[in-house]
Image (cartoon, helix red, strand yellow):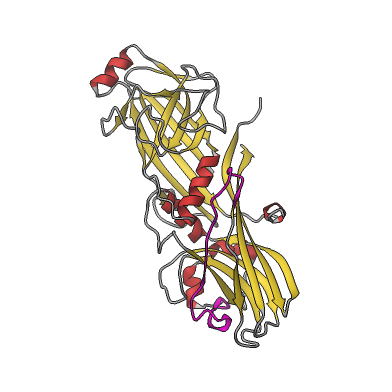
Amino acid sequence: MGAFSLKATRDGKVIHDGVYPNRWLVPGSDYLINTFFRGTPNEAPFHIGLIGDLGFTGLSDADTMASHSGWTEFSRYTNYPSGQATLRPEFLSWLENSSGYPGTGGPAGAINTRDTAGFTFGNGGSLASQFIVNSTVKLRAIFLTSGSAIGGTAGTLFATALVDSVGNELRVGDAVEIEYRHQLKTVLEEITEFIPRT
Amino acid sequence: MSQPEQTYSRLGGVFHVVHERGGSKLADFYAPNGVTSEGLVAMWNVATGSPIKGSPAQWYLGVLQKLTVNPALQWAVSWATIQSGAGRWSPVSTQLGWGGLLDPITFDAPINGTTLASVVMQTITSSTAGSPPFIEGLFITNAPNTSVSSAVLWCTAPVTLTSLSSGDVLTISYTLTTSIGTEGL
């Protein structure tokens, strides 16, 4: 299970702080199986992207990076701290222990992973700044992908999360920090549904 | 106001065991797997490009004798547990004619996500009558043999197979089903 934590600041003041559960998508499940059990090359590193309200009608569990009719990626930002205006921030996964620090361990049967990605609006690249001057955005959703290029359609779309049904307005110069936490755990369940049908 | 839901990847594994002697079926049952924390960590590490112990490209089926494990604690065992033979985690290999090697298995491609990664079944013929007299556990690892010191134990499963004799045939398959689970907050 995973969730995105989003904190937006303006002039050093927090203007938004929330946690949003993800919807892990089928291609994400297939990816785990294929890379782990079948030797399919991994697509690391992962990246985090933003979805604005322009043309936004909703997220779908059938969304992929190549096809998502209900939303458009918001691309007018600079990737902080790299200053990149063309690449989405990387999700550099690490394991954390029960105290929230990197390491193995943690609560019984559960492993947590997390990373923080930073977005700074209008801070840096001229191309980004030019776009941002005339563009505030109401942030609607977040996504986790293996694709690196802002606005690109390549890569696997692992998860999405709705941030706000109305949208949190961000302005030029606002900074957004997003942390993604993913928990893996084993649970005991009846096996009936896992027995292959013949 | 409805509560938001989150979805997650759900993996369910089950072993299918068939024990035959002289063409007669002595046992035919399913056994649920217990995925280990070591396995989950390795899966995430592979997905995100971090190294793991051993290769994720090839997996193997192993058999344990005299396994006693609380299913609620199956997550806590590891390849080190298997290799040490600690307690009752004693791998069986030579008695089943494997010569110390574990049986390689191949996963099919998942289909439509709700799917299956199934395993090619291997036929095992015990070569030594009465040794071991019974099998109490199955496991899946990426170690090709029991002498490999650094590997990942993906899962285990308690089973009960008694009175094995030379020439008996065990057909064991492992099916991993993936689906998307939903949970309200």
Please state the horizontal and vertical placement of residue A46, each as a whole percent of the image: 39, 41
Q: Is residue A14 above or below residue A157?
A: above
Quadrant of the rendered image containing residue A121:
top left
Q: Where is residue A153, by image quadrant? A: top left
Number of numbered callouts drawn:
0
Asked if the magenta segment contains residue A142, the reply would be: no
Q: Residue furthest toward the front?
A: B23
Question: Can residue A106 be seen at all in this image of the molecule?
Answer: yes
Asked whether B99 falls inside the magenta stretch, the response is yes
Q: Say if B120 sits above or below B47 in the image.
A: below
| Residue B149 in the image, given as x and y percentages of width and height | 41, 72
The percent coordinates of residue B111 (x first, y second) are 58, 46
User: Which is nearer the eye, B41 or A6?
Assistant: B41
The residue lying at 75 percent from left, 74 percent from top is: B25
Q: In screen coordinates, is A160 left or right of B68? A: left
Residue at the (38%, 29%) spot, across then down:
A152
Residue drawn at the location 72% of the way across and 66% of the way down = B29
Q: Is residue B165 left or right of residue A101?
A: right
Of B129 and A88, nearer the camera is B129
Q: In terms of depth relative to the viewer, which is nearer, A166 or B140?
A: B140
Name the main secondary structure of what is drawn in magenta.
loop
Which quadrant holds the N terminus of chain B? top right
| Residue A96 seen in the current view | no
Q: Residue furthest bottom?
A: B129
Provide the residue span drawn in magenta. B87-116
